[in-house]
Image (cartoon, helix red, strand yellow):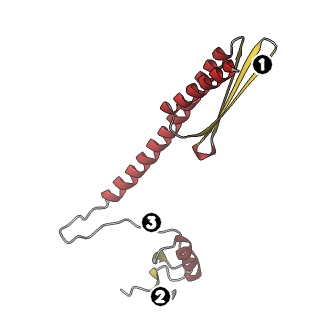
């Protein structure tokens, strides 16, 4: 009985040390099995974001099997941590690029006028413009009227009413 307690303590201490490599471990299941001369260890780690890492090893010594399975799991945890880091860095780079794009639209004069380019799509009817405005979830849409070929602005008021602005030259 003392041997199995020592083995359990050893396995738990090895698994607890995995938190140095990845701090998103929620729980760990350890299964130790003996089949004739084979000492088999299976470890399942439940990680954040519903990720599961599994490792197993077998040898003629249970301690060696534990060490091997923990080493395999350690490599998986390092790899997963690197993947998470790369994703985080990619998100940060994308956010920085968006921020730089916003900063590129700076006032070009002392009057605090912001110059923004507006790309007009194909000419559209008033109904198409209204549908487009609803799908953008914005307050106004600049468009070219399909019938008159004139530049128009469709504005949505806070009360849900629409206002069509037709510039007169």
Pointer 2 or 1: first along the chain: 1
Disc 1: CA contacts within 10 A as few (<14), some (14-19) or many (>=20): some
As helix, strand or loop, the secondary structure at mark 1 comes to strand
Residue sitting at x 26%, y 70%: 113
The CA distance from mark 2 to mark 1 is 79 Å
Disc 2: CA contacts within 10 A as few (<14), some (14-19) or many (>=20): few
Residue sitting at x 68%, y 16%: 62
Residue sitting at x 25%, y 65%: 107
As helix, strand or loop, the secondary structure at mark 2 comes to strand
Q: Taking the image as drawn, is residue 108 in sight?
A: yes
As helix, strand or loop, the secondary structure at mark 3 comes to loop
The CA distance from mark 3 to mark 2 is 21 Å
Q: Relative to 16, does residue 35 appear above or below in the rendering?
A: above
Pointer 3 or 1: first along the chain: 1
Residue occupied by mark 3 = 119
Q: Is residue 74 left or right of residue 85?
A: right
Residue 34 image label:
1
Residue nearer the viewer, 104 or 50: 50
Give the quadrant of the N terminus: top right
Residue nearer the viewer, 80 or 8: 8
Residue 132 image label:
none
Q: Position of residue 42 (x, y in %)?
A: 70, 27
The CA distance from mark 3 to mark 1 is 70 Å
Q: Give the label, 2 or 1, closer to the camera.
A: 1
Q: Is residue 129 left or right of residue 32?
A: left
Q: Give the label, 3 or 2, closer to the camera.
A: 2
Q: Give the label, 3 or 1, closer to the camera.
A: 1
Residue occupied by mark 2 = 163
Q: Position of residue 14 (x, y in %)?
A: 57, 25
Residue nearer the viewer, 65 or 77: 65
Q: Hey, which quadrant is residue 48 in on the image?
A: top right
Name the residue furthest front: 1
């Amino acid at each position: 009985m003392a041997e199995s307690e020592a083995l359990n303590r050893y396995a738990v201490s090895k698994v607890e040390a995995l938190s140095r490599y990845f701090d998103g471990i929620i729980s760990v299941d350890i299964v130790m099995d003996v089949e004739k001369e084979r000492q088999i260890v299976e470890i399942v780690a439940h990680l954040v974001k519903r990720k599961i890492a599994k490792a197993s090893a077998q040898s003629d010594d249970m301690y060696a099997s534990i060490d091997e399975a923990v080493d395999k799991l350690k490599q998986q945890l390092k790899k997963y941590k690197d993947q998470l880091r790369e994703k985080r860095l990619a998100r940060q780079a994308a956010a920085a690029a968006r921020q730089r794009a916003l900063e590129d639209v700076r006032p070009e004069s002392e009057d605090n006028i912001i110059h923004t380019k507006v790309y007009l799509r194909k000419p559209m009817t008033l109904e198409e413009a209204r549908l487009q405005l609803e799908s953008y979830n914005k307050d106004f849409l600049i468009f070219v009227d399909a019938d008159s070929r004139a530049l128009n602005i469709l504005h949505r008021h806070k009360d849900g009413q629409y206002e069509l602005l037709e510039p007169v030259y």
